[in-house]
Amino acid sequence: MKNKPIICHVTSAHPEGDIRVYHKMCVSMTNEFKVYLIIPNAKSRIENNVEIIGFESSFKSRFDRIKNAPKQIMKLALSVSADIYQLHDPELLRIAPLLKQKSGAKVIFDSHEDVPKQISNKPWIPSILRPIVSRIYSIYEKNTCKKIDGIISVTPIICDRFRKINPNTEMIANYPNITQFQKSMGILKIENAICYIGGLSENRGIIELVEALEYCQAELHLAGKFETKALELKTKKLKGWKKVHYYGQVSRNKISEIMALSHIGMVTLHPTPSYVEAYPIKLFEYMSAEIAVLASDFPLYRDLIGKYDCGCFVDPLNPEETGKTIQKMLNNPDQTKLQGINGYQAVLKEYNWESEREKLISYYTKTLSLN
């Protein structure tokens, strides 16, 4: 029997159990490929047929990690003798050309976001420096990505940008597994319940979302981690907080339970350059859980949600509009329920990981054949 090609995924920043890196890119590929995962602060082991290689990452700061982690990872990566190395963090582009040269393998970059645009919103970079850092990174990314074997990214807009740099670019979207968030049996919906699940930051609209509760009779079921303690304290002082059920960070099973008891899933992200052009995974998770979506009125979201009539749109910076739209959706339960059903059908038909998985297999096969 011919040996399976070896795919080695490498990350310096993603946590153990990351949905895209581990569950989708690694676990779902093990029938076709031998899969390794180099990941920080994990126990080395074989799990779900993935060979995990953990390393200690106790850097003093993000800058310390960006500076030193790639050198630490290089030796581990070369010990695998992979056919394809897939790098999941921008800082790892530093080792990409040398890894390709020393290993003789194919090296690809999985860009989970539009990094130059994300830099413009990073609170840990002084605001006066963000345009400069973004420009420097953009030039560096362009020069490095020309020298490697391919690029994977998550939206058409990001992929179009990368195709001008490297023609072997493929969109592999963060669509959900069809069965992962299906409607949980035995959990009844709570009257007027809505939910938001994900990172809690100002740019993700948590302040306006809680303020919107002053304009409707909804109860918000909220799960996720606040970006800072100061933001958490600020949010909990808002009048609308009394209508919030806050769970903190929760398991995937608990996420399914929260979505099952809710009528509407909220995706009211701010119109930052990166969010306007991104596919938020929570949007598809709500759809796969068969609940209606209330989303920021971005063209990309309209193309997705409007195509299947599975939700409504608001100005995310206007809490009053958001609150009144929530109330309108709750006052029309049959229509809102139908939007949830439409969303689930859209996931079955188009927005699912199973279809992306087949694309990824084809992409790996094509990349392995490149001269």
Image (cartoon, rainbow, N blue to C red):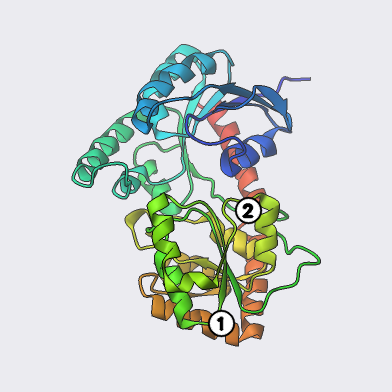
Nearest the viewer among 270 and 58 is 58
Determine whether 238 is above or below 59 in the image: below
Q: Dot 1 lies on which element?
A: helix
Give the mark nearest the N terminus, 1 or 2: 2
Quick one: label 2, few (<14), some, or many (20+) residues within 10 Å? many
| Callout in the foreground (1, 2) | 1
- The answer to which image quadrant residue 341 occupies is bottom right
Apparent side of residue 87 relative to residue 260 in the rendered image (left or right):
left
Residue 176 has which mark? 2
Q: Is residue 296 visible?
A: no
Total numbered circles: 2
- Quick one: which residue is furthest to the right in this view? 186
Residue 295 locus on image (x, y percent): 48, 69
Residue 258 locus on image (x, y percent): 66, 63
Residue 283 locus on image (x, y percent): 55, 61
Q: Amino acid at mark 1?
A: Met
Residue 221 locus on image (x, y percent): 59, 66
